[in-house]
Image (spheres, rainbow, N blue to C red):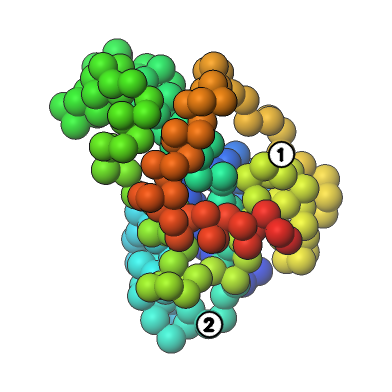
Amino acid sequence: MIWNGKRGYVFVEVPKTGTSAIASRLLEIDPEARRGEVVRRDGRRVALPVHAAATEIRRALGDEAGDYTFIAFLRDPVELMVSKYHFYRSGRASERSDRGDGGLGLKLRVAFARATPITLWCRLYPFKTSSHFVDDGAVPAVEELGDFARLQSEFLRIFSRFGYTEAELTLPVKNRTDYTPPTSRQRARIGAIARSRCRRDFELYEQAAAR
């Protein structure tokens, strides 16, 4: 999560939605941006996980939460499931595990992805849904939802209102996919699984995609 007291926003880092690129850029262009903490009016700093949920950040800010615009990006839930699977099977998590980093928990998650077909993994793996990070019950806990599919244009649309220039809001690197996408049959099966496991994610993503 990125907190910016001067410009009045909180960026909620929903995993696998371009958050690293956005967070890195905000930290690069603005010394007032802080990652992993908020600062209360009395100067007290409250540490938070990088992937803190919006509700957790709001609790840390207390009655000051209303002073900020909460922002998050969402991704097509089917693409998100596929991305998480390959993150463990052959992506950065896999690379870390092969180097001996990350501990036993990471090794087990990587081994499970490598040993399990994608549709079965999507059905069984206990991942956190996107709605976990941006919902407060059945009500969104963020004011601005961006669409990962239009990452650059959405980044510009949302953050330009906080006084940044277009040049500052140009992401230097495009997100790339380094795995083979699922077949149409696999995608249909994954879609059915995703709708049964994370229906709220589809509702929220449709809101983001419609903007």
In the image shown, does 21 or 142 lie closer to the viewer?
142
Tell me which residue sits at (26%, 17%) in the image: 115
State how many labels appear: 2
Residue at 56 percent across and 81 percent down: it is 67
Task: Identify residue for label 1.
Answer: 171
Q: Residue at x 77, y 48 (%)?
A: 153
Which residue is the site of mark 2? 66
x, y percent for residue 154: 72, 52
Residue 36 x %, y %: 41, 55
Q: Nearer the viewer, residue 91 or 57?
A: 91
Residue 167 is left or right of residue 1, and the answer is right
Does label 2 or label 1 sit earlier along the sequence? 2
- Disc 2 packing (10 Å; few <14; some 14–19; many ≥20): few
**Residue sitting at the far left:** 104
Q: Report the amino acid beneath label 1.
A: Leu
Q: Position of residue 57 (x, y in %)?
A: 41, 68
Label 2 amino acid? Gly
Mark 2 residue element: helix
Image height check: is 77 above or below 206?
A: above
